[in-house]
Image (cartoon, rainbow, N blue to C red):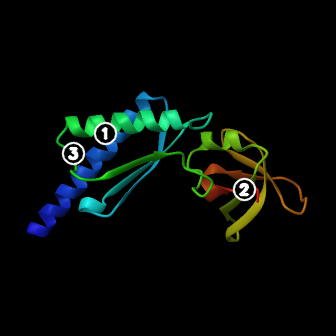
Amino acid sequence: MAAATRLASVQMANTQLHDLIEECVARRGAHVIDIVQHGRGIDALVEVFIDTEVGVTSELCADVSREVARELKATLLNPGSYRLSVSSPGIGRPLKFPWQYKKHVGRELTIRWKAETGVIQTDGTLLSLDDTGILVEEEGGSAPTHIGFDRIVTAKVKAPW
């Protein structure tokens, strides 16, 4: 019973932490892409990945980091000893929201998506997007394929090297 109570308390604290971070990021005109927590105690790390429609600057990351730290200290959510890292999602993180695709038009993507035959992987150039999905020209020069956002499992920008 005590373990279940501690688990519920940790989940509530995580929800409150995520809400606090979301509010701080939104005030800066950005979006939270992911929040990842690692370790406990003195090894605790909270990684916050943010993005905007025009990209992320180091100044934006620093501003968000300072604001989150200030808010944590002002609330009961101060988890004690931890490290906070705020950064852009980087090339290795999947695109999660339709608005993220716009700034990657013309770039190569690796997309896992649900086709009629099952989940397949497509590598190709992002040609355009609309309200329903993306248009990708697959490697090999076949006709462009429209992939609905609702069918995308993961999509990552391919490293240019």
Q: Depth check: 22 or 89 in front? A: 89
Residue type of the residue flagged with mark 1: Ala
Q: Position of residue 134 (x, y in %)?
A: 72, 47
Front of the two marks 3 and 2: 3
Q: Position of residue 47 (x, y in %)?
A: 41, 52
Front of the two marks 2 and 1: 1
**Mark 3–mark 2 distance (CA, rounded to whole Å):** 39 Å
Report helix, strand or loop for mark 1.
Answer: helix
Of mark 2 and mark 1, the one earlier in the sequence is 1
Q: Residue 69 — which label?
A: 1
Image height of 31 relative to 147, above or below = above
Q: Position of residue 107 (x, y in %)?
A: 76, 49
| Few, some or many residues within 10 Å of mark 2 (<14, 14–19, 20+) | many
10 on left or right of 58:
left
Residue at (35%, 56%) from the top-left corner?
45
- The answer to whether any part of residue 23 appears in the image is no
- The answer to whether any part of residue 26 appears in the image is yes
Residue type of the residue flagged with mark 3: Asn
Residue at (24%, 53%) from the top-left corner?
81
**Mark 2–mark 1 distance (CA, rounded to whole Å):** 35 Å
Residue type of the residue flagged with mark 2: Leu
| Quarter location, residue 24 | top left
